Image (spheres, helix red, strand yellow):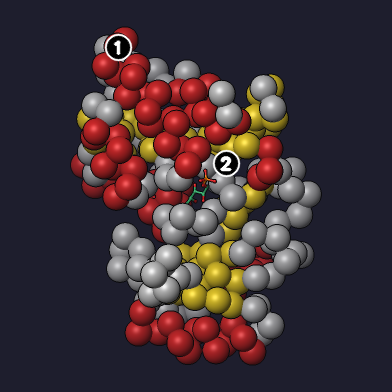
Amino acid sequence: MNEKELVGKEAAKYVEDGMVVGLGTGSTAYHLIVELGRRVREEGLNMIGVATSVQSAELAKEVGINVQSFNDVKEIDVTIDGTDEFDPALNGIKGGGGAHLIEKIIAVNSKRVIWICDHSKEVTQLGAFPLPVEVIRDASQHLFDGFVAKGYAPSYRLTPAGDKFITDSGNYLIDLHLEKIDNAPQLAEELIHLVGVVEHGLFLDIADHVIMAKDDKIVHFYK
Ligand SMILES: O=C[C@H](O)[C@H](O)[C@H](O)COP(=O)(O)O
């Protein structure tokens, strides 16, 4: 079993009968959703899934999970999602798959947030992974130029065909190649106050628990 599958299956054990569960996006969350579907079908697990992307909603429905929209549930008991980086304080960068806007909405409205990942995601300092910024299309070039002027080394997220990637919410993504982020709270404040920025991929003080796999071992990190 690979590391992503190992943590996906492990994290599914944290879901109890009757829970409303935020379902993450990406190649690690994939294994979580598949395992939850198995529990629903084979063990009769009674749960509601709130998906963080169109991709995860489709997968969850396919495997038999009752998927509801965030607007239709009262509260979310736990959200389980992947991450692109996490540091010793359990701050992270997300959005490698372009889903960080809805992921953040679901996560900050959850009683508990668990990240699941392979060991490549553990870092001492955030920033080697390009920081995604979701922007309104009409504002994108001016924001892009501003990022260049600040030395943030931006690039547009592209599809494999070379077109600009469009998020589930209809926006563009600009990735900032910062190498290292010295003051994440300050950068988060700066980005979120730029008009035309919808959301950035810095997830600060959001995760409560990280479940990481290293080879065949599972390592837990708690806040
Ligand atoms: O936009 C995508 C999400 O933030 C993912 O959770 C993140 O990119 C990690 O994905 P993966 O588990 O595929 O590495």
Residue 159 in picture, x, y percent from top left: 41, 67
- Say if residue 193 shows up in the picture: no
Q: Quadrant of residue 25?
A: top left
- Say if residue 58 shows up in the picture: yes
Q: Amino acid at mark 2?
A: Ala
Looking at the image, residue 64 lies above or below residue 179:
above
In the picture, measured across the screen, residue 167 lies left or right of residue 81, that is left
Instruction: Mark 1 and ligand 1: say if the CB distance to the nearest ligand atom is below 8 Å.
Output: no
Which residue is pictured at 30% across the width and 38% down the height? 59
Q: Residue furthest front?
A: 161
In the picture, measured across the screen, residue 174 lies left or right of residue 214, that is left
Q: Amino acid at mark 1?
A: Glu
Q: Residue furthest top?
A: 43
Judging from the image, what secondary structure is the residue with disc 2 in?
Answer: loop
Q: List the residue tagged with mark 2.
A: 207
Q: Is there CB contact under 8 Å for labels 2 and 1?
A: no
Q: List the residue tagged with mark 1.
A: 42
- Local packing at callout 1 (Cα closer than 10 Å; few below 14, some 14-19, many 20+) is few
Between 166 and 202, the one lying in front of the other is 166
